[in-house]
Amino acid sequence: MAEQDKNMVGNAVQPRENEDEDMENGDEVVDEVEEVNEEEFKSLNDQIDQLNAVLDTLESKNDNIHAELIELLKSNREARKQFQESQDKQPQANEEAKP
């Protein structure tokens, strides 16, 4: 009987149905993974779009602030120049007023 068992085991063949089911299950898993990946990619893409929009807004605000600071610097330089000129003229006026 032991010899018959060896022959049976040696001659055993895997049923084809199981292989087909495994392949179908594998295809289903691949489809599910692709669906999940597509959903994740869409979600990530949406998040990236939102971040880009926020960054564009920040960049625009930064550019506006930079332009305002440049104007403020120009204004301050002009005011300082005028102040210095008025200070330079005062000693001359005081010296001319002395007899």
Image (cartoon, helix red, strand yellow):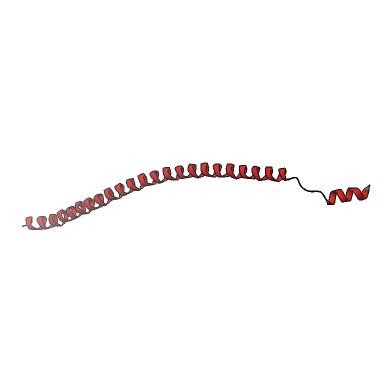
Give percent across and percent down for residue 7.
87, 51
Left/right placement of residue 79 relative to residue 12 reads: left
Left/right placement of residue 50 relative to residue 16 reads: left
Q: How many marks?
A: 0
Give percent across and percent down for residue 40.
52, 43
Residue at point 71% right, 43% down?
17
Of 38 and 99, nearer the camera is 38
Residue at far left of view: 99
Left/right placement of residue 88 relative to residue 69 reads: left
Give percent across and percent down for residue 82.
17, 53
Of 83 and 93, nearer the camera is 83
Left/right placement of residue 80 relative to residue 46 reads: left
Residue at far right of view: 1
Tell me if residue 23 comes above or below residue 84 in the rendering.
Answer: above
Residue at point 38% right, 44% down?
53
Of 31 and 23, nearer the camera is 23
Of 96 and 19, nearer the camera is 19
Q: Quadrant of residue 23?
A: top right
Give percent across and percent down for residue 28.
61, 42
Q: Quadrant of residue 99?
A: bottom left
Residue at point 42% right, 42% down?
50
Residue at point 30% right, 50% down?
66
